[in-house]
Amino acid sequence: MDRRQFVQSMIALGAASSASPEVLFGQGSSELRDLADAALATAKKLGATYADIRINRYRNQFIFTRDRRVQNIANTDDHGFGIRLIVDGTWGFASSSAVSKDEIARVAAQAVGIAKANRAINQEPVRLAPVEGFDTSWNTPVKKNPFEMPLQPKLDLLLQIHEEALKVPGASFVSAFMQFVNEHKYFASSEGSHIEQSLIRTYPSFTITAVDKATGKFYSRRSLTSPMGMGYEYVESYPLLQEARVAAEEAVATHKAKPAPSGPKTLILHPSNLWLTIHESVGHPTELDRALGYEANFAGTSFLTTDKLGTFQFGSKLVNLVADRTQENGMATCGYDDDGVKSSRWHLVKDGTFVDYQTTRDQAHLIGQKASHGCSYADSWGSVPFQRMPNVSLEAGTKDVSEADIISATADGVYVKGDASFSIDHQRYNFQFSGQTFWEVKNGKITTQLRDLAYQSNTPEFWKACDMLGGPSTYALGGAFNDGKGQPVQSNSVSHGCPIARFAGVNILNTGQ
């Protein structure tokens, strides 16, 4: 067989064995339901006491520009299915990219075989918290689907960012990009669920660098945008061009900025910085699998062991931290998790006390709970769902305290905006965070720009030092598009909301010394 015949035969085989993603993933597709039912029937016939199937499609668009040129445009499209089931109290999982009834039957049998093989080393039968069966759909409430928007306006906007930034004398280099994600997920379980979801995320961003030719030093300032669970309306509503001009001016000004002080200071954090501190010092340590020592990849375990649940003083009385998969525009926001559990909102820290964890159906009983918090997630049809972080956020203060109110109430402090480098130990206890721009605050006013600053603390001391919170008008979402966890590694998108917040007596470092 020559190469041409081989390619034609493969195309013919693919057409016969699986439908195109456009046909499969039309909203409300009856074909997806038929395929899912076939998987569940096969699993039950082969002895599974529980089974679920996820038939998913993942689309991405990446657009990169650099120094007034289009650097790269990439579109990716991937689909397939994964079958997870329980036989003799033991998990089995198998997956395939060929979505057809014959392949689903084969993979279901393979998953049963894997569960039986795993049984030999399983010491405790799987216990699933009860869940209601749902026959429904849920979509990210976007106004403009970015995958239906033409390419040229996206390129035009990115290149305009270059022009605006380079109008500032001293601005040397500009790069900008947009990324769009669509997860189309069909979940069905032997407990009666058929759930179809379409999740969309959008992220525009840029980086501007100013080089001092005399010293060879350079400073960069990224946009303060965060990826969002929104459509293209986020790109159109965010003032990217205005911020490009300001970012260029701040990058240039950093060269002549006053060196950061050292020692204890009043620390004021903008949401564009504080979201990352929440992610690392609250999001990861409240993952139950880390607290139990079941998971340590990428972020270690957790100092928040289960003996502290309900009694440990995590922060000051002002501190209320919530986990929320229903949060508007959140990247971890969805209707249902990959266990089929309906999304919800709950406190992790209430009035400063540590009160709860993130859980899945097979974890809830480990801390005496009767229901899952719906934190099961897989980043691909070929990945096993496991406990992943929901949106974890700091609630705003009850009074409408503004940024100006917090600045005017501060006699001697520093103000940090934007996220940058960080370091935290493997118990999520001792940490150090930096930022993008730093400002001196004296006698109730911002006086001058600073450079080379980081703050250092440990998790409970830091949150106990929180003595002032901005009101709802200062609240904003930040977030991470690619939060890694597990081995083999999986990637999760998650948002963290917070108001401007003030912390007393935090140790400040001059990183330039």
Image (tube, rainbow, N blue to C red):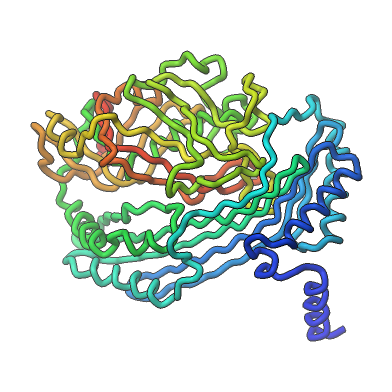
Camera-nearest residue between 203 and 37? 37
In the image: residue 418, left or right of residue 214: right
Q: Which of the 4 image quarters holds residue 246? A: bottom left
Q: Which of the 4 image quarters holds residue 419? A: top left
In the image: residue 232, left or right of residue 358: left
Q: Tell me which residue sits at (38%, 52%) in the image.
A: 226
Q: Position of residue 500 (x, y in %)?
A: 27, 37
The quadrant of the image that shows the C terminus is top left
Q: Position of residue 429 (x, y in %)?
A: 44, 26
Camera-nearest residue between 333 and 295? 333
Residue 366 versus residue 36 in the image, above or below = above
Q: What is the number of callouts on the image?
A: 0
Q: Tell me which residue sits at (65%, 24%) in the image.
A: 370
The quadrant of the image that shows the N terminus is bottom right
Residue 167 versus residue 425 in the image, above or below = below
Residue 3 versus residue 143 in the image, above or below = below
Q: Which of the 4 image quarters holds residue 99? A: bottom right
Q: Position of residue 431 (x, y in %)?
A: 40, 31
Camera-nearest residue between 5 and 358? 358
In the image: residue 432, left or right of residue 383: left
Q: Tell me which residue sits at (85%, 40%) in the image.
A: 48
Q: Position of residue 351 (x, y in %)?
A: 38, 21
In the displayed orientation, state which residue is furthest to the left: 443
Q: Tell me which residue sits at (61%, 52%) in the image.
A: 137
